[in-house]
Image: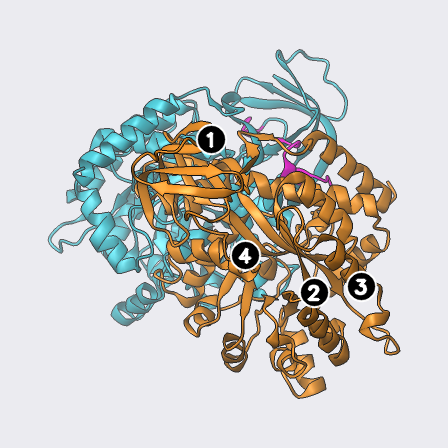
Chain colours: A orange, B cyan
Amino acid sequence: MIFEKIAALKADGTYLPSCYVGVKGAHIRYVGVTPPDEDYGERINGENRLLMPGFVNAHTHVAMTLMRGYGEDLRLQSWLFDRIFPFEDKLFSEAVYWGSLLGIAEMLMTGTTSFTDMYYFCEDTVRAVAESGIKANIGRGVSCFDATKRFADLPAYRDTKVLIEQYHGTEDGRILVDVAPHAEYTTRFDILHDAAELAAGHNLRMHIHLSETASEHKECVGRHGKTPTRLLEAVGMLGRPLTVAHGVWLTDDDVRCLSQYDVTLAHCAKSNLKLGSGVAPVEKYRRMGLPVAIGTDSAASNNALDMVDEMRMAALLAKGISRNAGALPAGDVLYMGTRAGALSQGRADCGDIVEGYRADLVVMDTTDVGLSPANAPLSNVLYGAGSRAVHMTIADGRVAYRAGEFLTLDIERVRFEVQRAVDKITGQ
Amino acid sequence: MIFEKIAALKADGTYLPSCYVGVKGAHIRYVGVTPPDEDYGERINGENRLLMPGFVNAHTHVAMTLMRGYGEDLRLQSWLFDRIFPFEDKLFSEAVYWGSLLGIAEMLMTGTTSFTDMYYFCEDTVRAVAESGIKANIGRGVSCFDATKRFADLPAYRDTKVLIEQYHGTEDGRILVDVAPHAEYTTRFDILHDAAELAAGHNLRMHIHLSETASEHKECVGRHGKTPTRLLEAVGMLGRPLTVAHGVWLTDDDVRCLSQYDVTLAHCAKSNLKLGSGVAPVEKYRRMGLPVAIGTDSAASNNALDMVDEMRMAALLAKGISRNAGALPAGDVLYMGTRAGALSQGRADCGDIVEGYRADLVVMDTTDVGLSPANAPLSNVLYGAGSRAVHMTIADGRVAYRAGEFLTLDIERVRFEVQRAVDKITGQ
């Protein structure tokens, strides 16, 4: 396909008022202001359209879309122990499949083309990813509260091995596998160390929750005399490319430490607010050299998987908390929500509109009321129309969503099966 | 019209899983779980629908939708002096009319049925309100930097008199007029005093910006030895029913003072963040007895006029800043965005689904992906689907928006005329 005379925004916010973008197979093969010589098949008129890189959701638990609205207005402990954990105790494979598809549908309709996930029943999420056309880095969350068990004894170890052997790099690389210890406070030194060894042995990336709440951060210092960050360093985890989620309570020393390694922070601004965890000062982190991407966290604590909403929140919070309207300008936050996310997934050929990159694209409808008048296209998307303006979402050159229609999944069926699964789990 | 077997949310968040709501003329005439005896004409099947009170935008400058995206990522002084004021210098009557219609269209499609406005060229905004079917409290912003001029010498005085005499209470009360001094720092003691006298003489409400920025608040104390709030009290303005916008920097004494009068704070969370003004601790204000409603401020500093987005932000900020996930639960924030707003406009018969009240209603489409699964309808609207789920918006019993169509305005024409006006003003 080729987009003709279309306005486009690059990952850094650069605006091209009219260009040609040709897609062949899974890749962008042409970007220019004049028409290419080559034939790209279907021609898409760029009038009233704005092309952007697909958004990358750098941290979520997609199957938890089942729990959207299930634990509202509750403090973290009550949210976890009274609502989330009892629900998860009854979770089953089919529920995870349908819940994953629902979350993926929401991401596709809001312009997300790739996400980084941590959960269990991962093969069901893999199936949903494979069918829907979206991309994902999938990690089996590892936690262990049994002092007699080593990493290799855990179901999470066996699941991770299956994921690596059967799915890593499949679907032409759409599916990648990460090694994903849940967090410092839900594992142990030796588990984290062994997980890092496993990742090193297979040349995989890692994914972990880090310093999400003040109490978790403080308790780690109390127990080990080290911050969670310095603990990860001590066990060797920072030797692997790593996504750390949340990082609300990182010290300056933590940030300096993380910045020396191949680490990206996944900023989950809305979830951090909704659970009362606080506000991560990501503008400072970026200034100190730590790459920051953007994640939604799960729909159980967000309760949306909408990256435009998330980018908007990241920018607004940075401005409001620092009391500087110039903080985190639109181009920076778009980069965080696209290219920085792709790099955090180890996908060097994703997250921007560049020849040779994967064709992960979102097309906005500029006739949306929130995009009028055309004073500032990127700001209009981020702050005006939001994801409502998403007209089309393309991953690896395949149209997955267009004008309210899902081309790769049956949304009626998904909603029905999700409700059935939730009713079964909650005993209704 | 009558909604049959429809789920409904009252202003306080109470959920009615299935009810009948009958509308005759401009009013709700029946609310019950059984069908009424009377005939209400058109029957609307409540399947896959959720009925809510229309949202009330308690503080905006609707014509500034012309300036959406026109001053991005700038500190307040630069935003005002380099972008907004030069634009406004070239503003003209027709531009305000079309800009108002664009903002009204955005509000209708996102479920807002009434707004409180402060600006100039108010007759053009009145015309847009009258035609579109929405409700508005309209105030001519009063400012004065000429020490030789009294209130009665100002164009704003003459404009306010015209508004009062020609438009107050017109359109069956849809249009109300407020007296609206812009702020303490843009007026003087005698202007504020005389404005309050004018309001008293016509039994009108008032509307003002108050303690929006730290510097404005501090400078007032420096100049007058009083906070802006205590200054308003001293000049007699608190004797009138009053909406104070922003209030980011109110002291506890200010809040106690305001709570003793008929004052509502219009919380503009997104604008306060975007301009770097800070975060108003509205949960504390409410605990101290100050009624809080919700406003978007203008699209020049938001950049949307989306009350669901604004309610979500209010709730999330309250939770995140207080580090208490239980702060500002969903029912409270809905009340702020509906009934509290209506009361701040002096519309005692608006802002809830109650027999005898005005039929200001919004109908959500519960098949939206963000409303699935149905664990918590109100949270799903606020945090999940957002305003994307708005299916129909009704003000005074008249359908103004339904399924992507505007029934009271020509949106193509509005967008065209807005762009033409903006191009003329910016010299393009």
Badge 1 vs badge 3, beta-carbon distance below 8 Å: no
Q: Which residue is more in the foreground, A406 or B264?
A: A406
Circle 3 chain: A
Badge 2 vs badge 1, beta-carbon distance below 8 Å: no
Residue holding disc 3: A156
Residue A241, picture quadrant: bottom right
Disc 1 residue type (three-letter): Leu
Q: Which residues are magenta?
A: B357-377
Q: Is residue B201 visible?
A: no
The Cα–Cα distance between marks 4 and 1, rounded to whole angstroms, is 41 Å
The Cα–Cα distance between marks 1 and 3, rounded to whole angstroms, is 50 Å
Q: Is residue A284 visible?
A: yes
Q: Secondary structure at mark 4?
A: loop
> Residue at point 64% right, 67% down?
A203
> Residue at point 57% right, 59% down?
A345
The Cα–Cα distance between marks 2 and 1, rounded to whole angstroms, is 45 Å
Number of disc labels: 4
Disc 3 residue type (three-letter): Ala
Residue holding disc 4: A347
Badge 3 vs badge 2, beta-carbon distance below 8 Å: no
Disc 4 residue type (three-letter): Arg
Circle 4 chain: A
> Residue at point 72% right, 27% down?
B19
The Cα–Cα distance between marks 2 and 4, rounded to whole angstroms, is 18 Å
Residue holding disc 1: B108
Same-subunit check for callouts 1 and 3: no
Residue A180: assigned label:
2
